Amino acid sequence: MQTSSFKAFLQQFHALTPEEWEAGLKRFASLKLRKGECFVKQGTICRKAAFIVSGTLRTYYLNAKGEETTYCFCPAGSISTAYKSFILQQASAHSLVAIEDTELVVIEYTDLQDLYKQYAGWQTLGRLLTEQQYLVMEHYAAVLNNESATEKYLRLESEQPEVILKASVEDIASYLGITRRTLTRIRSAKK
Amino acid sequence: MQTSSFKAFLQQFHALTPEEWEAGLKRFASLKLRKGECFVKQGTICRKAAFIVSGTLRTYYLNAKGEETTYCFCPAGSISTAYKSFILQQASAHSLVAIEDTELVVIEYTDLQDLYKQYAGWQTLGRLLTEQQYLVMEHYAAVLNNESATEKYLRLESEQPEVILKASVEDIASYLGITRRTLTRIRSAKK
DNA sequence: AATACTAAAGGACAAATGTCCCCGAATGAA
DNA sequence: TTCATTCGGGGACATTTGTCCTTTAGTATT
């Protein structure tokens, strides 16, 4: 299992003791997904959270019209799960799918709860990572609230340039809260 | 200090032992704000978090055009702080202001960190409340991404009817990511 | 190679929303 | 009371974005 990038990632937020790290590591398993494969399926209870070692996950839900709305492109080096379902342990309205071949390090919900109970360091990490996640979502909401279609596109291009290359027009448009048509207009205007 | 509603609120998420509750309570102080008064000012480091006993706080920031953008109306019975500034202990881009007379129960950043370190129960609560906050923001982003001006207004009306009564047209419009003009159009169309 | 899919681009028109005003009612200060 | 200020409503027009549909290119399948 490739875990050095995972350990370095956690280290940024909180230093675990060697015993905490060892105890935690035992409960993570590695998982490989091919492009297009699902990590979490809508309608199921999401019982696992992942650190993305390589690749990219796309998270989406179906809006009122039944269209896929992407709300996150999770790159290598980040944490991903269907948060609402994972937190509340209820059926997920969200799906997570690999948009390229992806390697994950995965922990089960019950194992994570055990770590929280047994190890203060993991509990602290849990809180800090959730705070981080909150900030990401707050930023996303601010962008959606204030920026025009073009501004949002340019921002994505500068903040997550890989996404422009890896994701489909459809997925990028829904992430930005605009239509395909608007996105192709923006792209042709840039030339 | 009026703390029974605070205790009941925390209880929903995690039961503290009597000692944990006592130890925590000592570090909270009550604070009253008049309508219009600031709890957190943009540009300062936010060093406190609050439980709202009564009243309503509005959180906002200035967008690229220098206009106030409201991103939350925090009602009685909820937690409020300038999360980004509080988490990172850096100057806040956000302000929090009372839109009616408001009573708070307030804890200092350092005291909260002490509670986290000393008491597993408070650490757990910290994580659970942050998760909650994440879900609120995720929901807000989903609404902003998918709904028309009218849909967002109707949703606010049903999810937080008090806000329609207490907040100004300006503040409601910026919260919904629309202009004053669009909001008055929606209101006149309803009659 | 022939065929069927799928994804991206874009034309034409419609609808939603924004911009720039002005007006009148309500509020507060002198 | 009078005056100034703030706030909500709304008219007229501009702009942005969405909708619907067609075309083209690329990809995969047989």
Image (tube, coloured by chain):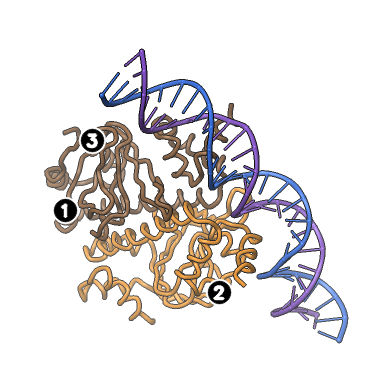
Chain colours: A orange, B brown, C blue, D purple
Query: To which residue does mark 1 refer?
Result: B115
Q: Gap between marks 1 and 3, in whole Å?
A: 26 Å
Q: Which residue is mark 3?
A: B33
- Measured as percent of width and height from the top left, residue A44 is found at 51, 57
Crowding at dot 2, Cα within 10 Å, few <14 / some 14-19 / many 20+, comes out as: few
Q: Which residue is mark 2?
A: A166
Which quarter of the figure has residue B191? Answer: top right
Which residue is pictured at 24% across the width and 68% down the height? A14
Q: Amino acid at mark 3?
A: Leu
| Depicted B46 relative to depicted B159: above or below | below
Closer to the chain start, of discs 1 and 3, is 3
For the N terminus of chain A, give its image quadrant: bottom left
From the viewer's side, name the closer residue of B165 and A5. Answer: B165
Identified by mark 1, the residue type is Leu
Q: Secondary structure at mark 3?
A: strand
Real-space Cα separation, disc 2 to disc 1, in angstroms: 44 Å
Image vertical order of residue A53 relative to residue B82, above or below: below
Q: Nearer the viewer, residue A38 or B68?
A: B68
- Crowding at mark 1 (Cα within 10 Å: few <14, some 14-19, many 20+): some
Can you tell which quarter of the image residue B150 is in? Answer: top right
